[in-house]
Image (cartoon, rainbow, N blue to C red):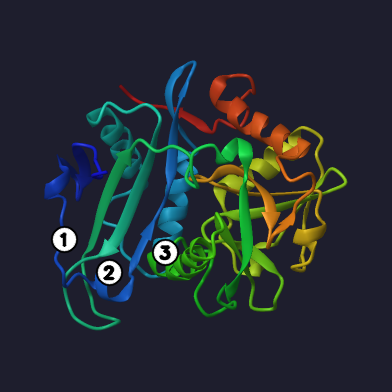
Amino acid sequence: MAQTYPELIWHNGQIKPWHEATTHVMAHAIHYGSSVFEGIRSYKTPAGASIFRLQDHLKRLFHSAKIYTMAMPWDLATLGAACHEVLRANKLDAAYIRPVAFLGMGGFGLSADCPTEVAIAARSMGAYLGDGVLEKGIDACVSSWQRPAPNTIPAGAKAGGNYLSGQLIAREARRLGFGEGIALAHNGLLSEGAGENLFLVFDGVLHTPPVAAGLLNGITRHTLMTLARAHGIEVVERDLPREYLYLADEVFMCGTAAEITPIRSVDGRPVGNGGMGPLTRRLQGLYFGLFDGSIEDRWGWLEPVQR
């Protein structure tokens, strides 16, 4: 089936036809991975289309750029307005929004001075890991590839180059017939999925690896920890050995794209009863309840789309 794209995209300060938002093959980012990006979702809510945690995502975009000393030619407010604009232009309500900033064509070499280009796309997207996985879950495997050690590639930046690691993990998992891969940190302890954070459940308590485990401090991760604590669910950030995946009552992945995806087995070993566990189901209800209006957004995370 041919891939279809939205008609319009925000590129370097203006809305353009999708096919006109191009860059040169000699752009620095193509050769050296010098890009930072975000994945953001908008949802159709009872109050109309709303973008979830837009400001937090854009702050992280600027933080990622700062780590790599990438000058941002537009401020946060401008890019926030552009996210609203690209949704309006494409008449989208529920959508996935992708802001990306990257070094374009300039000097040649790792430390070359190059202009920063910025683009923001929006398109409809269902469940990231496949149809039905939010209910049925996925089969996962522990990858043979590990996450980079601290002080090598900064995991705290959502940078394009970091996702070469994720590609190795995800492609290996698909080749072996699994829905997703789980990576270990440099010390052999649990880190995260190819592009998702990881949670384990023991006796009704949520456990998740710390940010020092070579993982991105995900916004969905923070959302779930906040919702859990607000509703009386204990959350523990701790080092976790690989075998705890096989012993946990429940395991799930989370992320803006993946949302909350149950893991029904790891390395061929069933997790719990082999389906979605009760705490995972409850957290799905709290999370998606923000968008259907059944859970109060007391944190101001939903930003109505400006029409």
Q: Position of residue 74 (x, y in %)?
A: 28, 51
Q: CA distance from mark 2 to mark 3?
A: 11 Å
Which residue has dot 1 on it?
Answer: 23
Element type at mark 2: helix
Report the amino acid beneath label 1: Thr
Position of the N terminus, as image quadrant, is top left
**Picture quadrant where residue 225 is located:** top right
- Residue found at x 75% / y 34%: 230
Q: Are marks 2 and 1 in contact (CB under 8 Å)?
A: yes
Q: Is residue 45 left or right of residue 90?
A: right
Earlier residue among tags 2 and 3: 2
Q: CA distance from mark 1 to mark 3?
A: 18 Å
Say what secondary structure mark 3 lies in.
loop
Q: Residues within 10 Å of mark 2 (few under 14, many from 20)?
A: many
Which mark is drawn over residue 29? Answer: 2
Q: Which residue is mark 3?
A: 159
As shown in the figure, which amino acid type bears the numbered disc 2? Ala
